[in-house]
Amino acid sequence: MSLELDDSVGEVAGVGPARAEELRAAGILTVGDLLSYLPMRYEDRSVRTPVSDLRPGMRTGVDVEVLSVRRKGRPGPRRATEAMVADDTGEALAIWFNQPYMATRFEKGDRAHLFGPVDEYKGAIQLINPVAADNADSPHLGRPVPIYRRIGSLGPGILRRLVSSALDQLAADQQRLPAEVTTQLGLIPMRDALRELHYPPTGADLALWEDLRSDAHRALAMAELIDFQTVLGLQRQRDEIEPGIARLLTAAAVDGVVSEFPFTLTEAQSRVLREVCDDLSADYAMHRLVQGDVGCGKTAVLGAAALAVALQGEQVAVLAPTEILARQHSVTLGTWGAALGVDVLTLLGADPKPTRAAAAQRLREGGPLLVVGTHALLQDSVEFERLGLVVIDEQHRFGVGQRAALRAKGRLQGTQPDLLVTTATPIPRSLALTIYGDLDVSRIDEMPPGRSPVATRRLERDEWPTLIDRLRAVIESDARAFVVAPAIESEEDGPETLATVQAVAKRLSEELGSDVVAILHGRQDSETRESTIEDFSQGKRPVLVATTVIEVGLDIPAATLMVVVQAERFGLAQLHQLRGRVGRGERNGECWLMVSSDITPTAAARIETLCETNDGFVVAESDLELRGAGELLGYRQTGPFGFRIANPRLHADWLRDAHQVALELARVDTTAALEYRERLRSTWRTRTRLARAG
């Protein structure tokens, strides 16, 4: 029976219900998924060595005749199996431990192909646990073979057999891309690429395969990248079918808003604000991402755009991921709005019910206003009279569905609200093109005057006394210090680990005084958090021990020191965000990263990167290299158009080509393009069905 790539993996010969379930648990739902399961490395088993040339330490293959087979040792499953084998040049002993089935695998006179490590025992040459086959066409021998990571109980040998079965059953015509695209890009046929992905030709440079740069990898990666980019392009087309709200945002009107700010915009801020306002003035809906480093002034840009839209008589919704950030925005935007006559409301889930009801009623009444809120804005009870602009701050903390749900509250009379999303987590250019292909990207690449780099240093655990001295100096200078721990409390952590807020606060209170140390974490109620932040800001308790709840939105100009305990437990992007909480006033900031004695090399590399640079985009590139695209953004690409072969960092050049091809495929209505788009929809439906069936 021939198979298609979208067929269930359970149709592959050798995949029964139990194996299908193990594969499904690893995200392998279809034949295509199985054939896209990348080997972790390759081993060239095409090498053949005469028996007389075998030497200890070699790893090679032999073609031999079996002279004898016997079991050795005490009866039981752990008995060794020995086979005396020979070719025209000499004899050797093949020995298998804990593989009782090998006793019946060969008989005297059989021909065998063996591959494995060579050793010597009492002057006799031995092959230890060699891979064995009686067929030169075996998927395990006689060629470069793939070595896979285990999936549950499915080891490399079993996976090789399943992949080989799938390749043998695969129907001939499996081309995913239109023929003209394949020709234009010089891609090898899909079926050939899948076979070569797993079984490189004899004599191939295996370094290309292990670096994911072979012709097979290029053909398969381009198919994934073009699929993904085409879906993004089609999504963008659907968004642009509905017209946006055309406004007349003159330069004078925008300057009137900015003039109320207590500072002058940088050139980068002004450039990005012009790009945003050009979109807001167009008759199509805006879809723009503003990204920039911590402290670059994104709030000023989003605030100017939001207030300018509100002055047009519309409503603006600003969605923030945390209550702290929402309140911070509410204070900042409220101050600017008051000078312009624009009301700024706050809508938080932690607010009393009457407060939320009053805010919701004000939104239904309409008129120019701006509302800042958390997930409470997404509730069905929240309705807008005329929502003109949706701003999603720290957008990577929200899902696409949440973004769409908020925008849907503003669709009326055939128009839809403009969308502005921001992030202070810098994304490498190659990744931004992949993840944000449905958005126009603006980048604030300049820091405001007076923002000095935060001096960052690594601190060993036994340097705790040095930290205490520095904290005392901070207190004496009337500055503030953050101390961040990775957990609130944990029974598993011993008293010496300093891994929790409670443990760190207790020790600091003992050495600095309980009257100077405050605690902040997400389990506290809203009132407690607000009063704690207020005491810290005013210097009543100048040392704040907290979790990463302070990662975004907390702007304390007097804060000059950030200490992260067990910094190796945090990712690069998160540490960079935490570092951005200090040095926001007139005094320079410091960041001390305290690490454990058993820090791993990868974690040490993260710490070293932070000590060497304050550039968030350099940090992001390093994070991408150390952890991969999915980990950097906090999720892995999954679903119908996830990446199994493509790697945005390694394949940035291929990604650019794929982006251009996808733009054309999403735009034209040729027969080939229409068939291709239908194939994408079919793949989506098939994977959805298979996922639900599981």
Image: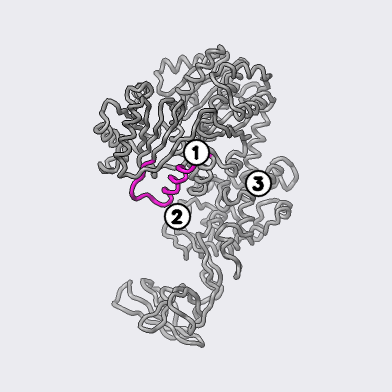
Residue 581 visible, this angle: no
- Residue 654 in the image, given as x and y percentages of width and height: 64, 50
- Residue 307 in the image, given as x and y percentages of width and height: 58, 19
Report the span colored magenta.
593-616
Viewer-side label of 2, 3: 3
Tell me how far mark 1 sits from mark 3, CA to CA.
28 Å
The relative height of residue 251 versus residue 232 in the rendered view (above or below) is above
Tell me how far mark 1 sits from mark 2, CA to CA.
44 Å
Q: Secondary structure at mark 2?
A: helix
The relative height of residue 34 versus residue 640 in the rendered view (above or below) is below
- Residue 656 in the image, given as x and y percentages of width and height: 65, 46
- Residue 517 in the image, given as x and y percentages of width and height: 30, 28
Image mark for residue 614 = 1
Say which of 230 and 473 sits in front.
473
Say which of 416 and 345 sits in front.
345
Identify the residue position indicated by label 2 in the image. Answer: 22
Q: Residue at the spot x=65%, y=17% of the render?
A: 253
232 in the magenta segment: no
